[in-house]
Image (cartoon, grey):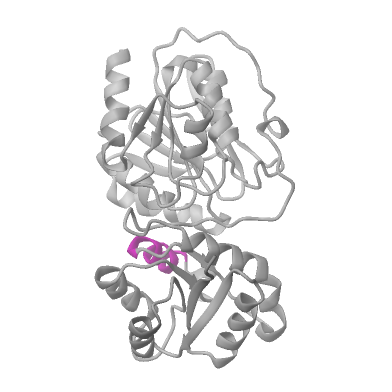
Amino acid sequence: MSRIRVLIVDDSALVRQLLTEILSSDKELEVVGTASDPYVARDKIKELRPDVLTLDVEMPKMDGITFLGNLMRLRPMPVVMVSTLTEDGADVTLRALELGAIDFVAKPKIDLANTLHEYTDVIVSKVKTASSANVHALEAIVEKKKVVPKLSADAVLVKENLPHYTTTDKIIALGASTGGTEAIKDILLKLPVDSPGVVITQHIPGNFSATFAKRMNSICKMVVCEAIDGQQILKGHVYIAPGDQHLLVDRRGTKYICRLNDGPSVNRHKPSVDVLFRSVAQCAGHNAVGVILTGMGDDGASGLLEMHEAGSQTIAQDEKSSVIWGMPGQAVKIGAVEHVVPLKKISQKIMALIQKDE
């Protein structure tokens, strides 16, 4: 099997050297070249035809964001951002993801020469994931994996067999990972202002979720916010899980409310889609619509199955429109999905299912 060809673009000779050492340490990767600025990178892309590009944000002659925009317009390819700016500059990073970057890695702020190697597993994993992404489908990803034991949703929320509630209040639950920020944006932009309340778990670092919520709120008809513990879930509102806590849905009388949980990571993620979906299955049952979107791994598949078994309508994004068809593909495989739908038609399908059930 041929190795994944990587081109490193960074103005720092030290970073180029360190990244070359890190990526070359994996037998499945081959660093075919490096570039100190976007103009050199442009020529080397044509010459070397890499499979994946690692790209810095802050560079001479042309910044990485401008270069990325040109690249994704003229020659779309998998890109992983590697920059110190991506840690604090959530706006810059989200802009890169909107333009088509697959993922990002933040460089250490201090003692780069001695600490960047600590990120070896993360960098290698993200470059490999990027190599298999469908860059023509959409333009975003934020997924930060941690090497921790894989737990089920039982670690946070014990499965219960509860009767369906008689309330007619509807709720929409979305779960996503790799490529999910842009998929979520596409759906939210098309949902009507009087849509049932929407709860979302997207695999995203803690210092990005609030910025992501603000960005969505600025462009959507619905009110979008980062979820707060005890917050009532209202029509026309969207609640996004904080990037370092699980989001659950609970009942207070006839009302749905948000609950945040600081329990262990589930499926190596916190927040976990399985945790959200299980809570929705338990408290909303047939009054819910569950949607599993593009993402690496299988988080959310078993939770969506529980929603399906509780009477919820379930939707999976189709393979063609997914950046990575891991999570939705697994949900389809285990029989959790009733409707497999292209991204551009998911919001329409959600509303059709809700209106049909009213």
Indicate whether residue 260 is drawn in magenta.
no
Q: Position of residue 11 (x, y in %)?
A: 48, 89
Name the residue at 68% across, 42% down.
262
Q: Residue at x 69, y 24 (%)?
A: 158
Magenta span: helix, strand or loop, mainly?
A: helix
Horizontal side of residue 178 vs 259, given as left or right:
left
Residue 77, by quadrant, is bottom left
User: Which residues are drawn in magenta?
Assistant: 90-99
Closest to the observer: 106 or 239?
Answer: 106
Q: Is residue 99 visible?
A: yes
Q: How many marks?
A: 0
Q: Residue furthest right?
A: 149
Q: Is residue 93 magenta?
A: yes
* Residue 125, x across and y down, in percent: 59, 62
State the quadrant of the N terminus: bottom right
Where does the image place residue 325, in percent across and percent down from the top left?
A: 45, 45
Residue beneath the point at 27% across and 18% down: 355
Where is residue 16, by image quadrant?
bottom right
Q: Quadrant of the C terminus?
A: top left
Q: Is residue 251 visible?
A: no
Residue lying at the far front of the rendered structure: 1
Q: Nearer the viewer, residue 104 or 192?
A: 104
Horizontal and vertical percent for residue 216? 35, 49
Q: Quadrant of residue 275?
A: top right
Position of residue 332 relative to residue 356, above or below, is below
Residue visible at 49% across and 17% down in the picture: 285
